[in-house]
Amino acid sequence: MRDGACTLTVGPLGSARLLVRGVNWLGDAVLSSAGLMRLREARPQAHITLLTPAWLAPLWAHHPAVDAVLTFEPGESLWAVARRIREGRFDLALVFPNSPRSALEVFLARVPCRVGYARRWRRWLLTHPVPPRPAEVPMHKRSSRQIRRLSSQPHLQLSPIPPAAHHVHQYLALTAVLGANPDPVPPLISVLPDEVRAIEARFGFLRAEPRRPLLLGLNAGAAYGPAKQWPADRFAAVAAALQQQLHCHWWILGSRTEEPKAMAIAQAIRHAGHCPPHWVHVLAGRTTLRELCAALKACDVVLTNDSGPMHLAAAVGTPVVAIFGSTSPELTGPGLPGDNRHVVIRGRAGCAPCFRRRCPIDHRCMQSVTVDQVVAAVRDAVARLP
């Protein structure tokens, strides 16, 4: 096919070689899985290859919507990535990210059909630039001056944000250009039973006991920045209270950089709860991405900040209790809007949501969330378990 000479709704694309240029953050990648599922549904005979950062590649193992994974490393040149794409001889590229570079990669690779959102500096790189969605709500960062001015005001009830503003619809709307059903489906990450059994065995969690113990996960980090993180001492207080009340086991999750925080939380739980040491395990920094998926699947409920692991827990099917402050659950809440398996606790402040990485004042949105609120929310989530 000549460059730009393609049809998106009929003809050879039904069994074509399709490239999906994936996104670069864990949470966004999980949300994009809904679009991939709809794409597979619409193009069951197509060969779908996902181009993704190498560190995210394990996320897509066993995924029903992906036939192959193509990776790139941090700092790899634009030309090297384009060359690898060109070798795949793809008929169409669906570009999920909004960046100019992602569109330039498929342009330089000479993929005949290139579909993506018509953002600044990249419209001309796409054969089919898609206008922004009418329901799209930008996440504008507030300035420090705005935050200081608004923080002294009471929390205002903002105009209702429609469910269609949720970021899962960003990917669904793009796949709809290829004839896919735009109706939302929950994000999905596949985890095999053997993977769950392996992580349970590694950390000594025995489901074969006469009465199956309750296993709760705790993720006190957020890679985006400290503005999204509820204080670690409050996470510890919640976990200690729930351990005493529910006699539950805890897995403390997180990245390698979050391991010291996880260790401190685990120690606080053991000290306050007077529980056996093997009831609390630190997994932070000790799991691969696939093992993290399996660990989240093993948990009965996960308590977390707004983060990649929050989205991942929801996508493997585990109920989530999520704490939001500087961000908007209407835009990036766990799972799909209205999914009552998940509970969102929202910090209240006149300046929230600010979408900042760091709070320039006193983190009052997160400080407004109390230990008692979170304890009650987790207990409610546990009570709803089948």
Image (cartoon, grey):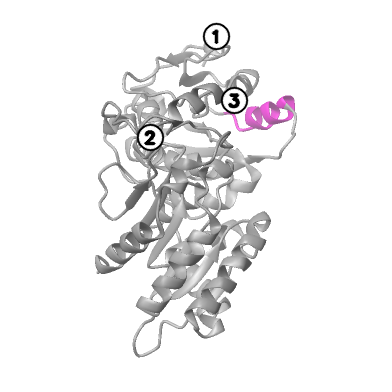
User: What mark, if any, has residue 124 been given in the picture?
Assistant: 1
Q: Does the rendering let one see residue 141?
A: no
Q: How far apart are marks 1 and 3 (CA)?
A: 13 Å
Q: Which segment is the magenta one?
A: 78-89
Kind of residue indicated by mark 2 = Leu
Q: Is residue 158 left or right of residue 332?
A: left
Residue 198 vertical placement versus 64 (above, below):
below
Q: Distance between the residues labelled 3 and 2?
A: 23 Å
Q: What element carries label 1?
A: helix
Q: Does the magenta stretch include residue 87?
A: yes
Q: What element carries label 2?
A: helix
Kind of residue indicated by mark 3 = Ser
Q: How far apart are marks 1 and 2 (CA)?
A: 28 Å
Residue 205 coordinates in the image, percent (x, y): 49, 80
Report the residue at 53% width, 18% height from top.
112
Q: Is residue 3 magenta?
A: no
> Which label lies toward us, 3 or 2?
2
Residue 275 vertical placement versus 186 (above, below):
below
Report the residue at 51% width, 41% height from top.
363
